[in-house]
Amino acid sequence: MRNPSKAGLAAPRRDPWSFEVPAALALGALVLLVLACGGDGRPPDAGGQPPADECGAAATVCAVAEVVNLAARTSDFTKVVAMAAPREYECPATPPIGPGGPYPLCKGARAGEERQGFPIVYVPGEAAVDTREALLRALNAWASAAQPGKSDAYGSGGNRLFTVGCAGEPAFCGEKFALVVSNISSIQTRLQAVLFFETEDRQPRLTWTAIGSLTQLTRSDAVLRGGKTAEFLSFEGWPRIGAFYPLRSDAEGCPVAAEVCDVAARVGKAVETADLRSLIAAAALKEYTCPAQRPQGLGGPYPLCDNAAGGEKRSGLTIAYLQSEGIVVDREGALQALDRFVAAAQPAKTDAFGDGGNRLYTVGCPDDAAACKDNFALVFSNLGSVPYRTMLLLFFERSGGEARLAWIAIGPLLDASQQDAVLKGGRIVDFLRFAGWPPLTTFHRLGQ
């Protein structure tokens, strides 16, 4: 067992631990392995199907996996890091030469001073011990670098939970386990964040984190898709790990392409937190040529072209107000419209579809399921001061590999069958259509 101080980490003064990496990975190419175990506590054979349980793993693992998967899809690991258990370190009198020791946690500390920190391994790179805030920044930075529009043999480049792992002995199946999430980063490399949990007093605690590149391609198929493998990492007090399995819940929780669910998770959080500026900033505006004179009545690219010279070109976004007229606005006008919708919600109200808060209900797709990656709508709804449920439909189209907001629709759906379909999931024969778009006919309910 190698002392962790020689791998860039000093052992904590209490609760000592260590890890070792085989010689094949000595150059910093870290391959992280995980093993899913069944809900009955028996490890799988890593050659067939996952156990017939809710997510293919123990109940504790499934519950934590749900939190981690949501964090990955929303690029916000706040709730995950809140589960982290700090370790206590005694700071040395002087920092070691080169890597090693509980740094940067102990930077500026007195000799013998005790500080609580969290071990993080960067691959390739050095191990570190840092604060809870630094751990959150590291995970969120990793997640924010994801490129959902990219893809490789393992799927889209968006953040996604791939596998869950635990030790081979049944007694440890829900007590010590690891979750692997992966993305394709802005440097066109598939990266992983691996989160190691221990369950104490029935409470799972994040105890160790690794972030970096999975460089051993001969082993990466097993790590991301499931299968047996040789040992890569071992921890003091942890049983040996030798196989890994994909979680079923990730695929089952997303009724459409993973790329669409990635967008849904990010936009859902933006609506929930009323932070919509980045969504509008990335919207795909269309160019309009302003007429010399505004037509009488409705029609034309207005108010976008107010006070424009004849022939002037301006870029804007169309908002269709259901049961009313449509308009074309600039980015600021679109942001104001979305802000008004979000601010109008009255969560205390209820109806047959739930409470009155802003909530993502379904994703609308064309008949051709494959086309859903390129053209889809996210359906939000709330209850406000008006005597009906208001819808917000955000229409996305994929351009240059990235799904971007292209149209907005706001208002009530007075046809009860249409309202049921877009809120509960179902089919609609004749729905909103936009030029160049296939008709959206099927609405899939997203996990609540």
Image (cartoon, rainbow, N blue to C red):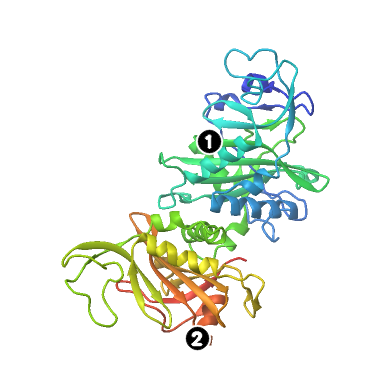
* Circle 1: element type: strand
Outermost residue toward the front? 307
Query: Earlier along the polypeptide chain: callout 2 or callout 1?
Result: 1
Look at label 1 and name its amino acid. Answer: Gly
Look at label 2 and name its amino acid. Answer: Leu
Left/right placement of residue 130 relative to residue 263 reads: right
Give the residue at x 73% y 38%: 85
Q: Which residue is mark 2?
A: 414
Give the residue at x 68% y 20%: 109
What is the quadrant of residue 236 in the picture? Answer: top right
- The answer to whether residue 229 is seen in the rendering is no
Tag 2–tag 1 contact (CB < 8 Å)? no
Residue 58 in the image: state x and y as whole percent.
74, 53
Left/right placement of residue 393 relative to residue 447 reads: left
What is the quadrant of residue 81 in the picture? Answer: top right
Q: Which residue is mark 1?
A: 212
Residue 187 in the image: state x and y as whole percent.
41, 39
Give the residue at x 45% y 55%: 277
Left/right placement of residue 138 relative to residue 324 reads: right
